[in-house]
Amino acid sequence: MFVFGDSLIDPGNNNDLNSLAKANYVPYGVDFNGGVPTGRFCNGKTIIDYLGDLLELPLLPPYTSSSVNSGNIVGGVNYASAAAGILEETGQNLGERFTLSEQVQNFDNTLNQLKGQMNEQELSHYLASSLVVMILGSNDYINNYLQPSFYTTSYFYTPEDYADLLIQRYRRQILVLQSLGTRKFFLGGIGPLGCIPNQLATGLSSPGKCVSFVNDYVGMFNVRLRSLVDQFNRDYKGSIFVYGNTFAALGDIIRNASTYGITVTDRGCCGIGRNQGQITCLPFSSPCTNRSQYIFWDAFHPTAIVNQILASKAYGGTTSDCYPMNVQQMAQI
Protein backbone atom coordinates (compact mmCIF):
# COMPACT_ATOMS: atom_id res chain seq x y z
CA MET A 1 0.00 0.00 0.00
CA PHE A 2 1.34 3.39 -1.05
CA VAL A 3 -0.32 6.37 0.59
CA PHE A 4 -0.58 10.03 -0.43
CA GLY A 5 -2.38 12.64 1.63
CA ASP A 6 -2.50 15.23 4.39
CA SER A 7 -2.63 15.35 8.20
CA LEU A 8 -5.60 12.97 8.35
CA ILE A 9 -3.15 10.18 7.49
CA ASP A 10 0.35 11.67 8.07
CA PRO A 11 2.28 9.09 10.16
CA GLY A 12 5.07 11.53 11.05
CA ASN A 13 6.52 12.85 7.80
CA ASN A 14 6.27 16.43 9.09
CA ASN A 15 8.24 15.74 12.29
CA ASP A 16 11.53 16.99 10.87
CA LEU A 17 10.15 19.72 8.63
CA ASN A 18 10.13 23.42 9.47
CA SER A 19 6.37 23.41 9.87
CA LEU A 20 3.67 24.55 12.26
CA ALA A 21 1.70 21.45 11.25
CA LYS A 22 3.20 18.86 13.58
CA ALA A 23 1.81 16.36 16.05
CA ASN A 24 5.03 14.96 17.54
CA TYR A 25 4.17 15.95 21.10
CA VAL A 26 1.87 14.85 23.93
CA PRO A 27 -1.14 14.42 24.00
CA TYR A 28 -1.03 13.26 20.37
CA GLY A 29 -0.78 9.48 20.23
CA VAL A 30 -1.99 9.01 23.79
CA ASP A 31 -3.65 5.72 22.77
CA PHE A 32 -0.97 4.50 20.36
CA ASN A 33 2.62 3.29 20.55
CA GLY A 34 2.57 3.25 24.36
CA GLY A 35 1.58 6.92 24.40
CA VAL A 36 4.79 8.05 22.67
CA PRO A 37 3.84 10.57 19.94
CA THR A 38 4.73 9.47 16.41
CA GLY A 39 3.46 12.52 14.52
CA ARG A 40 -0.04 11.15 13.90
CA PHE A 41 -2.73 13.82 14.27
CA CYS A 42 -4.91 11.60 16.41
CA ASN A 43 -5.17 9.98 19.82
CA GLY A 44 -4.56 6.60 18.19
CA LYS A 45 -4.50 4.94 14.79
CA THR A 46 -5.30 6.69 11.52
CA ILE A 47 -7.60 5.39 8.79
CA ILE A 48 -4.49 4.03 7.02
CA ASP A 49 -3.35 2.10 10.11
CA TYR A 50 -6.77 0.45 10.41
CA LEU A 51 -6.99 -0.22 6.68
CA GLY A 52 -3.56 -1.85 6.87
CA ASP A 53 -4.80 -4.06 9.73
CA LEU A 54 -7.76 -5.19 7.61
CA LEU A 55 -5.45 -5.92 4.66
CA GLU A 56 -3.01 -7.72 6.99
CA LEU A 57 -0.20 -5.34 6.09
CA PRO A 58 2.52 -4.20 8.50
CA LEU A 59 2.34 -0.65 9.87
CA LEU A 60 3.46 1.53 6.95
CA PRO A 61 6.62 3.56 7.59
CA PRO A 62 6.63 7.29 6.89
CA TYR A 63 8.70 8.22 3.83
CA THR A 64 11.13 10.17 6.02
CA SER A 65 11.88 7.24 8.37
CA SER A 66 15.25 5.53 8.54
CA SER A 67 13.68 2.17 7.68
CA VAL A 68 12.62 3.54 4.29
CA ASN A 69 16.12 4.86 3.66
CA SER A 70 17.53 1.42 4.45
CA GLY A 71 15.21 -0.17 1.90
CA ASN A 72 12.54 -1.70 4.16
CA ILE A 73 9.74 -0.76 1.77
CA VAL A 74 8.21 -3.95 0.37
CA GLY A 75 5.05 -3.58 2.51
CA GLY A 76 4.59 -0.03 1.23
CA VAL A 77 5.33 3.56 2.25
CA ASN A 78 3.22 6.46 3.53
CA TYR A 79 4.09 9.83 1.92
CA ALA A 80 1.27 11.89 3.50
CA SER A 81 2.20 15.28 4.89
CA ALA A 82 0.20 17.58 7.17
CA ALA A 83 -0.95 20.84 5.50
CA ALA A 84 -0.43 19.36 2.02
CA GLY A 85 -2.97 19.89 -0.68
CA ILE A 86 -3.52 19.23 -4.34
CA LEU A 87 -2.30 22.73 -5.24
CA GLU A 88 1.36 23.59 -4.71
CA GLU A 89 0.69 26.71 -2.64
CA THR A 90 -1.89 25.11 -0.32
CA GLY A 91 -0.73 25.05 3.30
CA GLN A 92 2.25 27.34 2.77
CA ASN A 93 0.94 29.54 5.60
CA LEU A 94 1.95 26.66 7.93
CA GLY A 95 5.48 26.23 6.58
CA GLU A 96 7.18 23.26 4.98
CA ARG A 97 5.19 20.25 3.81
CA PHE A 98 5.42 17.69 1.04
CA THR A 99 2.95 18.89 -1.59
CA LEU A 100 1.13 16.29 -3.68
CA SER A 101 3.60 16.67 -6.55
CA GLU A 102 6.50 16.24 -4.10
CA GLN A 103 4.84 13.15 -2.62
CA VAL A 104 4.58 11.70 -6.14
CA GLN A 105 8.26 12.51 -6.69
CA ASN A 106 9.08 10.77 -3.40
CA PHE A 107 7.23 7.69 -4.67
CA ASP A 108 9.42 7.80 -7.77
CA ASN A 109 12.46 7.74 -5.46
CA THR A 110 11.01 4.65 -3.74
CA LEU A 111 10.51 3.09 -7.15
CA ASN A 112 14.21 3.49 -7.88
CA GLN A 113 14.95 1.63 -4.62
CA LEU A 114 12.53 -1.15 -5.59
CA LYS A 115 14.21 -1.51 -8.97
CA GLY A 116 17.32 -2.57 -7.09
CA GLN A 117 15.35 -5.25 -5.21
CA MET A 118 13.30 -6.85 -8.03
CA ASN A 119 13.60 -7.62 -11.71
CA GLU A 120 11.38 -5.82 -14.19
CA GLN A 121 8.69 -8.52 -14.31
CA GLU A 122 8.51 -8.85 -10.51
CA LEU A 123 8.28 -5.09 -10.09
CA SER A 124 5.53 -4.80 -12.68
CA HIS A 125 3.45 -7.47 -10.91
CA TYR A 126 4.19 -5.95 -7.48
CA LEU A 127 3.04 -2.47 -8.55
CA ALA A 128 -0.05 -3.78 -10.32
CA SER A 129 -1.17 -5.63 -7.18
CA SER A 130 -0.33 -2.78 -4.78
CA LEU A 131 -3.02 -0.43 -3.48
CA VAL A 132 -2.60 3.33 -3.89
CA VAL A 133 -4.60 5.37 -1.34
CA MET A 134 -5.01 9.11 -1.87
CA ILE A 135 -6.80 11.34 0.64
CA LEU A 136 -6.37 14.99 -0.32
CA GLY A 137 -8.33 18.18 -0.84
CA SER A 138 -9.30 19.26 2.67
CA ASN A 139 -6.39 21.70 2.96
CA ASP A 140 -7.16 23.15 -0.45
CA TYR A 141 -10.23 24.55 1.28
CA ILE A 142 -9.23 24.99 4.95
CA ASN A 143 -5.69 26.22 4.23
CA ASN A 144 -6.32 27.95 0.93
CA TYR A 145 -9.75 28.84 -0.48
CA LEU A 146 -11.37 29.63 2.88
CA GLN A 147 -8.46 31.82 4.00
CA PRO A 148 -8.69 34.97 1.83
CA SER A 149 -6.23 36.81 4.09
CA PHE A 150 -3.49 34.35 3.02
CA TYR A 151 -4.64 33.19 -0.42
CA THR A 152 -6.20 34.88 -3.43
CA THR A 153 -7.93 31.82 -4.91
CA SER A 154 -11.41 32.85 -3.72
CA TYR A 155 -11.01 36.21 -5.54
CA PHE A 156 -10.23 34.54 -8.86
CA TYR A 157 -12.30 31.35 -8.80
CA THR A 158 -15.94 30.67 -8.17
CA PRO A 159 -16.47 27.57 -5.99
CA GLU A 160 -17.34 25.59 -9.16
CA ASP A 161 -14.25 26.78 -11.02
CA TYR A 162 -12.06 26.07 -8.02
CA ALA A 163 -13.37 22.50 -7.80
CA ASP A 164 -12.62 22.15 -11.54
CA LEU A 165 -9.08 23.44 -10.99
CA LEU A 166 -8.45 21.00 -8.13
CA ILE A 167 -9.72 18.03 -10.14
CA GLN A 168 -7.64 19.03 -13.16
CA ARG A 169 -4.43 19.17 -11.06
CA TYR A 170 -5.34 16.02 -9.12
CA ARG A 171 -6.01 14.14 -12.36
CA ARG A 172 -2.53 14.98 -13.60
CA GLN A 173 -0.79 13.55 -10.51
CA ILE A 174 -2.97 10.41 -10.39
CA LEU A 175 -2.05 9.69 -14.01
CA VAL A 176 1.65 10.13 -13.22
CA LEU A 177 1.32 7.38 -10.60
CA GLN A 178 -0.61 5.24 -13.06
CA SER A 179 2.08 5.74 -15.71
CA LEU A 180 4.68 4.49 -13.20
CA GLY A 181 2.91 1.12 -13.02
CA THR A 182 0.34 1.33 -10.20
CA ARG A 183 -3.12 -0.01 -11.09
CA LYS A 184 -5.39 0.07 -8.01
CA PHE A 185 -6.47 3.44 -6.69
CA PHE A 186 -8.64 4.36 -3.72
CA LEU A 187 -9.46 8.08 -3.91
CA GLY A 188 -11.03 9.40 -0.72
CA GLY A 189 -13.45 12.29 -1.07
CA ILE A 190 -13.44 15.28 1.28
CA GLY A 191 -15.47 14.95 4.47
CA PRO A 192 -18.09 17.49 5.64
CA LEU A 193 -15.62 20.25 6.54
CA GLY A 194 -18.48 22.56 7.51
CA CYS A 195 -19.06 20.29 10.52
CA ILE A 196 -15.53 20.25 11.98
CA PRO A 197 -14.93 22.26 15.19
CA ASN A 198 -12.57 24.63 13.36
CA GLN A 199 -15.39 25.73 11.05
CA LEU A 200 -18.06 25.74 13.79
CA ALA A 201 -15.79 28.15 15.68
CA THR A 202 -16.11 30.74 12.89
CA GLY A 203 -19.66 31.47 14.05
CA LEU A 204 -20.88 31.27 10.44
CA SER A 205 -23.57 28.78 11.39
CA SER A 206 -26.28 28.77 14.01
CA PRO A 207 -25.68 26.57 17.08
CA GLY A 208 -26.09 22.89 16.33
CA LYS A 209 -25.75 23.43 12.57
CA CYS A 210 -22.82 22.82 10.24
CA VAL A 211 -21.52 25.63 8.02
CA SER A 212 -23.60 24.77 4.97
CA PHE A 213 -21.75 26.78 2.32
CA VAL A 214 -18.46 25.04 3.23
CA ASN A 215 -20.14 21.65 2.83
CA ASP A 216 -21.56 22.84 -0.50
CA TYR A 217 -18.07 23.76 -1.72
CA VAL A 218 -16.52 20.40 -0.88
CA GLY A 219 -19.61 18.70 -2.32
CA MET A 220 -18.74 20.25 -5.68
CA PHE A 221 -15.27 18.71 -5.46
CA ASN A 222 -16.65 15.31 -4.45
CA VAL A 223 -19.15 15.18 -7.34
CA ARG A 224 -16.30 15.86 -9.76
CA LEU A 225 -14.03 13.30 -8.11
CA ARG A 226 -16.66 10.60 -8.47
CA SER A 227 -17.11 11.55 -12.13
CA LEU A 228 -13.34 11.36 -12.57
CA VAL A 229 -13.42 7.80 -11.18
CA ASP A 230 -16.04 6.89 -13.82
CA GLN A 231 -13.96 8.47 -16.55
CA PHE A 232 -10.74 6.75 -15.45
CA ASN A 233 -12.45 3.35 -15.24
CA ARG A 234 -13.67 3.83 -18.82
CA ASP A 235 -10.34 5.07 -20.19
CA TYR A 236 -7.88 2.81 -18.38
CA LYS A 237 -9.23 -0.71 -18.65
CA GLY A 238 -6.33 -2.44 -16.88
CA SER A 239 -6.68 -0.23 -13.81
CA ILE A 240 -9.28 0.12 -11.05
CA PHE A 241 -10.30 3.45 -9.55
CA VAL A 242 -12.54 3.66 -6.48
CA TYR A 243 -14.20 6.71 -4.94
CA GLY A 244 -14.41 6.71 -1.14
CA ASN A 245 -17.50 8.62 -0.02
CA THR A 246 -16.00 10.16 3.12
CA PHE A 247 -18.63 12.90 3.11
CA ALA A 248 -21.53 10.45 3.46
CA ALA A 249 -19.68 8.13 5.85
CA LEU A 250 -18.66 10.87 8.29
CA GLY A 251 -21.99 12.63 7.83
CA ASP A 252 -23.76 9.44 8.92
CA ILE A 253 -21.61 9.23 12.06
CA ILE A 254 -22.41 12.86 12.90
CA ARG A 255 -26.15 12.50 12.28
CA ASN A 256 -26.54 9.10 13.96
CA ALA A 257 -23.83 9.44 16.60
CA SER A 258 -25.69 7.52 19.29
CA THR A 259 -25.86 4.37 17.13
CA TYR A 260 -22.04 4.41 17.09
CA GLY A 261 -21.83 4.98 20.86
CA ILE A 262 -20.78 8.60 20.31
CA THR A 263 -22.18 11.46 22.38
CA VAL A 264 -20.05 14.53 21.46
CA THR A 265 -20.24 15.68 17.85
CA ASP A 266 -19.38 19.38 17.78
CA ARG A 267 -16.13 19.88 19.67
CA GLY A 268 -12.71 18.30 19.94
CA CYS A 269 -11.69 15.97 22.75
CA CYS A 270 -8.46 17.87 23.00
CA GLY A 271 -9.39 21.14 24.67
CA ILE A 272 -10.87 22.82 21.63
CA GLY A 273 -14.07 24.63 22.50
CA ARG A 274 -16.57 25.91 19.96
CA ASN A 275 -15.06 29.38 20.17
CA GLN A 276 -11.43 28.44 19.97
CA GLY A 277 -10.62 27.19 16.44
CA GLN A 278 -7.01 26.42 17.34
CA ILE A 279 -5.13 24.50 14.73
CA THR A 280 -4.18 21.54 16.90
CA CYS A 281 -3.96 20.35 20.51
CA LEU A 282 -1.69 22.44 22.69
CA PRO A 283 1.43 20.65 23.98
CA PHE A 284 0.85 18.77 27.24
CA SER A 285 -2.82 19.72 27.36
CA SER A 286 -5.12 17.17 28.99
CA PRO A 287 -7.51 15.54 26.52
CA CYS A 288 -10.92 14.20 27.47
CA THR A 289 -10.89 10.76 29.09
CA ASN A 290 -13.94 9.38 27.22
CA ARG A 291 -12.29 9.57 23.80
CA SER A 292 -14.41 6.85 22.21
CA GLN A 293 -17.45 9.08 22.71
CA TYR A 294 -16.05 11.93 20.60
CA ILE A 295 -16.10 12.29 16.82
CA PHE A 296 -13.30 14.84 16.80
CA TRP A 297 -9.94 14.57 18.49
CA ASP A 298 -9.00 18.23 17.89
CA ALA A 299 -10.34 21.10 15.77
CA PHE A 300 -9.72 19.22 12.51
CA HIS A 301 -9.11 15.51 12.97
CA PRO A 302 -11.28 12.53 13.92
CA THR A 303 -10.66 10.30 16.93
CA ALA A 304 -9.25 6.81 16.45
CA ILE A 305 -12.71 5.27 16.96
CA VAL A 306 -14.04 7.27 14.00
CA ASN A 307 -10.99 6.39 11.90
CA GLN A 308 -11.73 2.72 12.61
CA ILE A 309 -15.36 3.11 11.48
CA LEU A 310 -14.28 4.93 8.29
CA ALA A 311 -11.64 2.29 7.52
CA SER A 312 -14.18 -0.52 7.92
CA LYS A 313 -16.60 1.29 5.57
CA ALA A 314 -13.80 1.71 3.02
CA TYR A 315 -12.80 -1.93 3.34
CA GLY A 316 -16.16 -3.68 3.39
CA GLY A 317 -18.78 -1.04 2.73
CA THR A 318 -21.59 -0.86 0.18
CA THR A 319 -21.46 1.21 -3.02
CA SER A 320 -22.80 4.19 -1.05
CA ASP A 321 -19.53 4.09 0.95
CA CYS A 322 -17.19 2.99 -1.85
CA TYR A 323 -17.93 3.27 -5.54
CA PRO A 324 -17.93 1.16 -7.69
CA MET A 325 -16.44 -1.42 -5.27
CA ASN A 326 -14.85 -1.55 -1.83
CA VAL A 327 -11.21 -2.06 -0.91
CA GLN A 328 -11.67 -5.74 -0.03
CA GLN A 329 -13.14 -6.43 -3.49
CA MET A 330 -10.35 -4.40 -5.14
CA ALA A 331 -7.68 -6.35 -3.22
CA GLN A 332 -9.06 -9.65 -4.52
CA ILE A 333 -8.70 -8.65 -8.17
Image: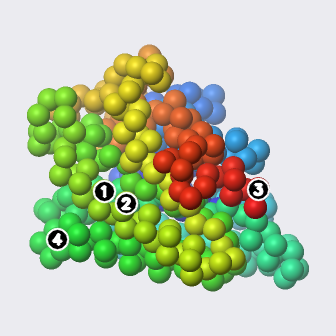
Q: How many marks?
A: 4
Q: Which residue is mark 1?
A: 219
Q: Alpha-carbon distance for marks 1 and 2? A: 5 Å
177 is higher (above) or lower (below) than 55: below
> Which mark is drawn over residue 222?
2
x 17%, y 71%: residue: 158
The quadrant of the rendering that contains the C terminus is bottom right
Residue 278, percent across and down?
26, 40
Q: Sequence order check: which comes first, mark 3 or mark 2?
A: 2
Q: Which residue is mark 4?
A: 158
Q: What amino acid type is highlighted by mark number 1?
A: Gly
x 34%, y 58%: residue: 139
Q: Alpha-carbon distance for marks 2 and 4? A: 16 Å
x 25%, y 63%: residue: 144
- State if disc 2 and disc 1 touch (CB < 8 Å): yes
Judging depth in this view, the residue of 96 and 41 nearest the camera is: 41
Q: Alpha-carbon distance for marks 3 and 4? A: 41 Å
Q: Which residue is mark 3?
A: 332
* Secondary structure under the numbered disc 1 in the rendered image: helix
